[in-house]
Amino acid sequence: MPVAEYNLLKGKPVMMRPATENGVYVDTKRRVYKRNTSRVIRTKNLCILARHLATLLRAGLPLAPALSAMVEQLGDNPLAQIMRQVADSVNAGSTLADALGKHPGVFSSLFVSMVAAGEASGALEEVLLRLAEMTEKRMQLANKVKSALAYPLMMVVVAAGVVVFLLSFVVPSITQVFLEMNRALPWPTRLLISMSAFIKTYFVLIAVVVCAVLFGIRAWLRTKEGRIIWDRSKLKLPLFGALFLKLEIARLTRTLGILLVSGIPILRALEIAKGVIQNSFIADSLDSVRDWISRGDTIANAIRKTGLFPSIVFHITATSQVSGNVEAGFIDIADMYEGEVEMTTKTLTSLLEPAILLVMGIIVGFIVLAILLPIFEINQVL
């Protein structure tokens, strides 16, 4: 992401200057427009746009009428206004890639570069279909991971809420009876009373501290150094670290494979792929890969030098380079790791759910035990 764009997204002023993306001049107002439209237009809409436009072109419809048909098809969709401007630019003599490049908040450098490659090769409809298929695969993989981890996360939130509610409102009313009896209480009961009293007394302070910590972490993650440290730490997490790495490798290799198939040079493909990677630590390592390749090193050796990727990635890339079909090798790697991500996600989910239930059961069991122990002692005395 360019520095000016990054500053604007963070609320900082941006000086008007020529943009380096696609040779399009972008001023401050357009940057603001980019930020607003990117919130409305989803990736799913762009995927549908690419597939429908490719179908129209494959049916033999010229580009300008195809764009007009897409504007009519979109109707009230926020993307319709953008496509109307794109169609006007194309009718005025602009290429489709240049017209799309005027809206960087909607169409990424990946989208624009692939369209430019398709126009140059005369196979625009094929490139649009590849773009739609790649976007669909990325969305499907991300949705599978999110849906698989959503339930365990919801269980953690609900469990924490239940425990806080019990300690703040239920336990105090019950334990007050024990305190009024002026009897020696078992240590679990005393511990429970102390925890309940602490949470009830300092509930507001605890909430303020938690919110302050969360906002502080969020601000720290917005810095480049903080983001890199966080992303590097994510890769070292037990169980989840391998999942995050496989997910990024699948995203990277599929993007590179599709870009190379579309005729985009490897150095430009790496530059575009860097914007697709969500882990900033891995994304920064691609700069080193580009430098090594530009100095004459092979793609496989450059990937191996980073020390981030498993050896199988190096071997498949090296073998596909020898056969002269490195793009197919990248796509094979993506297919392999997408399958592993799905299996790893299912395994983690199957492990997390009983673990969360076990921890929740232990906590609730301790609360119940702390309440029942004094009652048992009273019954024995009576």
Image (cartoon, rainbow, N blue to C red):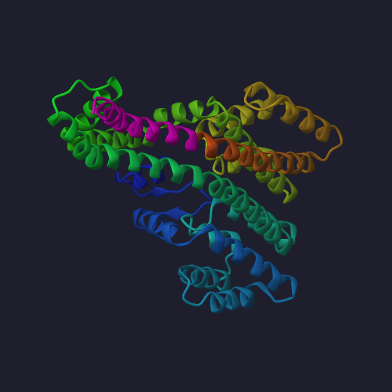
- Find residue 214 and report its horizontal and vertical position in percent: 31, 36
Residue at image location 53% in from the left, 26% down from the top = 237
- 133 above or below 278? below
Residue at image location 23% in from the left, 39% down from the top = 168
Q: Is residue 372 magenta?
A: yes
Give whichever of 159, 368 is nearer the camera: 368
Is residue 316 something one can see in this rendering? Answer: yes
Left or right: residue 380 versus residue 107 is left
Answer with the quarter of the image where residue 249 lies. top right
Q: Is residue 377 magenta?
A: yes
- Find residue 55 and report its horizontal and vertical position in percent: 70, 70
Q: Which residues are magenta?
A: 356-382
Residue at image location 45% in from the left, 69% down from the top = 78
Is residue 298 something one can see in this rendering? Answer: no
- In terms of secondary structure, what is the magenta stretch mainly? helix
Q: Residue furthest right?
A: 323
* Quadrant assignment for the C terminus: top left
- 118 above or below 297? below
Left or right: residue 14 versus residue 308 is left
- Find residue 118 and report its horizontal and vertical position in percent: 70, 58
Give whichever of 216, 198 is nearer the camera: 198
- Find residue 316 and report its horizontal and vertical position in percent: 79, 32
Q: Residue furthest front?
A: 382
Left or right: residue 78 versus residue 277 is left
